[in-house]
Image: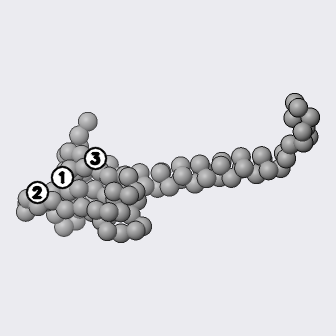
């Protein structure tokens, strides 16, 4: 195949590049969905029971670099700053939302 100026165009290379870009964007979207499922309904202001304690979400960090820094884990995809309402202490967690976690107070 030739372009407008008559020079040959490598169609296979263009197609391979597009396929690679599409596959990468699909995997990025899949990771985003998995991360959202792992965070669950936790957003700032939500109060929930996690099986051991009642906590309030202070902030949710989805920036990979910041999440990995605050949790000190290279594989972290998110971090959640929570306040233990009984003890009054703040800490970061990377725990996923599970079936035993219960929202006690939701925010709009």
Q: Nearer the viewer, residue 70 or 30?
A: 70
Q: How is the image coloured?
A: one colour
Q: Secondary structure under badge 3?
A: loop
- Residue 57: image location, x then y, percent: 22, 51
User: Can residue 79 be seen here?
Assistant: yes
Tell me how far mark 1 sits from mark 3, CA to CA.
9 Å
Tell me how far mark 2 sits from mark 3, CA to CA.
16 Å
- Lower sequence index among marks 2 and 1: 1
- Lower sequence index among marks 1 and 3: 3
Q: Is residue 77 left or right of residue 57?
A: right
Bin the neighbour count of mark 2 within 10 Å (Cα to Cα): few under 14, some 14-19, many 20 and up: few
Bin the neighbour count of mark 1 within 10 Å (Cα to Cα): few under 14, some 14-19, many 20 and up: many
Asked whether the beta carbons under mark 1 and mark 3 sit within 8 Å of each other, the answer is no
Q: Which residue was labeled with disc 1?
A: 56
Q: Is residue 67 left or right of residue 48?
A: right
Q: Residue at x 78, y 47 (%)?
A: 15
Asked whether the beta carbons under mark 2 and mark 1 sit within 8 Å of each other, the answer is yes
Residue 7 marker:
none
- Residue 97: image location, x then y, percent: 34, 59
- Residue 8: image location, x then y, percent: 90, 42
Q: Residue at x 58, y 54 (%)?
A: 27
- Lower sequence index among marks 2 and 3: 3
Residue 43 marker:
3
Q: Secondary structure under badge 1?
A: strand
Task: Examine the image and state in which quarter residue 92 appears.
Answer: bottom left
Residue 85 marker:
2
Q: Secondary structure under badge 2?
A: loop
């Amino acid at each position: 195949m030739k372009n407008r100026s008559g020079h040959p165009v490598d169609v296979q290379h263009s197609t391979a590049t597009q396929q690679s870009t599409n596959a990468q964007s699909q995997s990025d979207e899949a990771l985003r969905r998995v991360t959202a499922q792992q965070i669950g309904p936790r957003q700032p202001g939500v109060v929930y029971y996690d099986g051991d304690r009642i906590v309030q979400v202070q902030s949710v960090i989805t920036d990979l670099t910041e999440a990995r820094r605050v949790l000190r884990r290279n594989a972290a995809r998110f971090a959640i700053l929570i306040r233990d309402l009984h003890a009054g202490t703040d800490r970061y967690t990377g725990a996923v939302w599970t079936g035993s976690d219960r929202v006690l107070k939701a925010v709009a």
